[in-house]
Image (cartoon, rainbow, N blue to C red):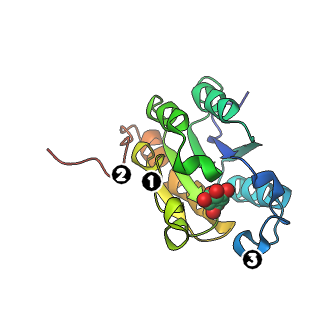
Amino acid sequence: MARRGNRPVLVLHGPNLNLLGTREPAVYGRVSLAEINRAIQHHAAARGARAVCRQSNHEGELVDWIQSAAREGFQAIVINPGAFTHYSIALRDAIASISLPVVEVHLSNVHAREEFRRHSVIAPAATGQISGFGSASYLLGLDAVLQGPMARARAGRRAPRRATRRAR
Ligand code: DQA
């Protein structure tokens, strides 16, 4: 359970990200997931926030965490859905069904890679997307929720659900 009142943010890592450090280092670098999680937690603490990091190789477990995030007291989610980015309608629907701000992050620049990585089924349901800055993508994602939607929510204004909502 995330304690309320200290800007708790849930950081989710999808499949194969447990292998960071040894997995395709030319693409994803040599920093391990444990090191990334320490950097995320340090970055959050320096900004008066608190990050709880979880990783799963299982779609349903990620769906469960997204569904229970608000109930657990989290105020925002930063998620790297890994390969689920490109085809998981279940993750996309879970994100669309909650009202917390959700930032999608990627270590690599998915738009500069293979064709199948250029499409995200998650992006239309997310508040925004950060891609291509290595492990710093997570820190930028954290800054995005802390300075954007969460800051506005604290100021008593309603956070916009999506950055790309069309004007009518
Ligand atoms: C990734 C990009 C995805 O295409 C890939 O399947 C991953 C990692 C990234 O962080 O760059 O597992 O999400």
Residue placed most toward the observer, 87 or 55: 87
- Depth check, mark 1 against mark 3: the one in front is 3
Residue occupying the point 60% across, 46% down = 84
Tag 2 residue: 163
Q: Is residue 137 left or right of residue 35?
A: left
Q: Is residue 98 left or right of residue 20?
A: left
Tag 3 residue: 26
Tag 1 residue: 128
Residue occupying the point 48% across, 62% down = 118
Q: Is residue 109 visible?
A: yes
Give the Cα separation between the discs numbered 3 and 2: 32 Å
Secondary structure, mark 1, is: strand
Q: Quadrant of residue 22?
A: bottom right
Q: Quadrant of the N terminus?
A: top right
Answer with the quadrant where ligand 1 appears in the image. Answer: bottom right
Position of residue 96 relative to residue 20, above or below, is: above
Position of residue 41 relative to residue 60, above or below, is: below
Residue count near mark 3 (Cα–Cα under 10 Å), binned few <14, some 14–19, many ≥20: few
Q: Earlier in the sequence, mark 3 or mark 2?
A: 3
Residue 160 percent coordinates (x, y):
35, 43
Residue 83 percent coordinates (x, y):
62, 51
Residue count near mark 1 (Cα–Cα under 10 Å), binned few <14, some 14–19, many ≥20: many
Secondary structure, mark 2, is: loop
Q: Earlier in the sequence, mark 1 or mark 2?
A: 1
Residue placed most toward the observer, 147 or 114: 114
Residue lying furthest front: 115
